[in-house]
Image (cartoon, rainbow, N blue to C red):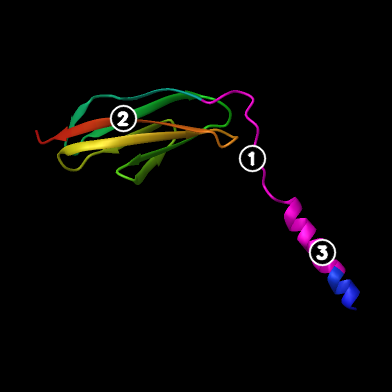
């Protein structure tokens, strides 16, 4: 009985080890070409479109400002609710977990 339990534990362990997810392989290198906003400044409570241009395999985009995630995808609409200058950062990651980041500053003003 102990042998059957030991064999079962070993088989379960092998199953979990073999299911470990590996990083993918990128056939095309990640190149983060540009990051741009429709304008450098925008009125408070207006939407501002910010976009990234990158190439590579199976890319994901993560957008943040002041450490807070504000969106995903190649473009985001960013609404600024008070007058200030904001740091907007985009990080692009490919299938092999290579990543590149770019950032811009956007200023909002009270009309």
Number of numbered callouts drawn? 3
Q: Which residues are magenta?
A: 7-30
* Disc nearest the viewer among 2 and 1: 1
Residue at the (37%, 27%) spot, across then down? 51
Q: Is residue 101 left or right of residue 50?
A: right
Q: Contact (CB < 8 A) between labels 2 and 3?
A: no
* 3D distance between C-alphas at marks 2 and 1: 32 Å
Q: Residue furthest top?
A: 33
Q: Position of residue 63 (x, y in %)?
A: 38, 38
11 lies above or below 107: below
**Numbered mark located on residue 23 in the image:** 1
Q: Residue furthest left?
A: 111
Check disc 1: other Cα within 10 Å, few if <14, some if 14-19, many if 20+: few
In terms of image quadrants, where is residue 69?
Answer: top left
**Numbered mark located on residue 107 in the image:** none
Say whether disc 1 or disc 3 marks the residue closer to the N-terminus. Answer: 3
* 3D distance between C-alphas at marks 1 and 3: 25 Å
Residue at the (14%, 39%) spot, across then down? 83
Check disc 3: other Cα within 10 Å, few if <14, some if 14-19, many if 20+: few
Label 3 sits on residue: 10
Numbered disc 3: secondary structure: helix
* 3D distance between C-alphas at marks 2 and 3: 54 Å
């Amino acid at each position: 009985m102990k042998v059957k339990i030991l064999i079962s534990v070993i088989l379960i362990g092998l199953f979990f080890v073999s299911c470990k997810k590996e990083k993918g392989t990128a056939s095309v290198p990640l190149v983060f070409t540009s990051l741009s906003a429709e304008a450098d400044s925008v009125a408070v409570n207006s939407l501002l479109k910010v976009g990234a241009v990158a190439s590579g395999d199976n890319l994901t985009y993560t957008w943040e400002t002041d450490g807070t995630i504000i969106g995903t995808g190649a473009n985001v609409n960013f609404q600024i609710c008070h007058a200030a200058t904001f740091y907007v950062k985009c990080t692009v990651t490919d299938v092999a977990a290579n990543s590149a980041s770019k950032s811009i500053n956007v200023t909002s003003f009270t009309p």
